[in-house]
Amino acid sequence: MENMVIRSFKERDIDAILKLNEKEGWDRLTNKEDTFHALNNSEPALVACIDEDIVGYLRGITDGIVTLYISEILVRQEERGKGISRALMEEAHRCFPSTRVEVLANADTEQYYKSQGFRSFFGFRKASKEFKPI
């Protein structure tokens, strides 16, 4: 997209990102303090803007050499299908070019990632509240 800019996350972006998360139903990522902390302490943390309007974001975690894990990537519903998600992932990988890129998918996003050349792998997840004290 010609008028799209991808840049690093800034503190002023948090309200727009919270709105994106809320519209998507990502309840765990609608608390301002927690979401800001997560983005501020992640690398890379990128936003996609069209005319200064945030239309998507990516939050990654990496060791800088082996693995870049995309923990969240979200594009506004009306802007999907325009290459924004792919551009965010490519920019994240440009920051850490030797890394493999791993991303979780669900039933709604599985075909998209396969169409982008990702292959499936096996993994597990447990939420923090599911851990019992020892």
Image: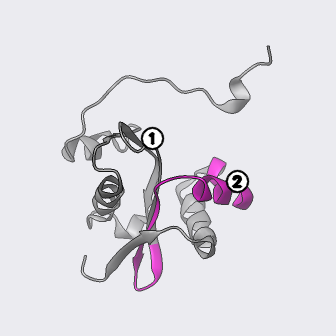
> How far across and how far down the image is residue 126, in percent?
60, 26
Give the amino acid type for the residue marked by disc 1 in the picture: Asp
Confirm whether the magenta stretch covers residue 32.
Answer: yes
Q: Amino acid at mark 2?
A: Asp
Q: Which residues are magenta?
A: 28-54
Q: Was residue 121 drawn as part of the magenta stretch in this picture? A: no
Label 1–label 2 contact, CB within 8 A: no
Is 55 left or right of 26, judged from the image as shown? left
Query: Which residue is nearer to you in this view: 95 or 13?
Result: 95
> Circle 1 sits on which residue?
63
Q: Which of disc 2 and disc 1 is earlier in sequence?
A: 2
Tell me the quadrant of the picture where the N terminus can be found: bottom left
Instruction: Judge the density around disc 2: few (<14), some (14-19), many (≥20) Cα neighbours within 10 Å.
Output: few
Which-is-in-front pick, marks 1 and 2? Answer: 1
Q: Residue furthest top?
A: 134
Horizontal and vertical percent for residue 45? 49, 59
Residue 85, by quadrant, is bottom left
Q: Is residue 1 above or below residue 29?
A: below
Residue at 52% over, 67% down: 9
Q: Residue at x 52, y 56 (%)?
A: 24
State the image quarter where residue 94 is shown: bottom left
Q: Where the C terminus falls, by quadrant?
A: top right
Badge 1 local density, few (<14 within 10 Å), some, or many (20+)?
A: few
Task: Name the residue rendered at 35%, 36% in the picture.
Answer: 66
Q: Secondary structure at mark 1?
A: loop
Question: Which circle marks residue 34 in the picture?
Answer: 2
Q: CA distance from mark 1 to mark 2?
A: 22 Å
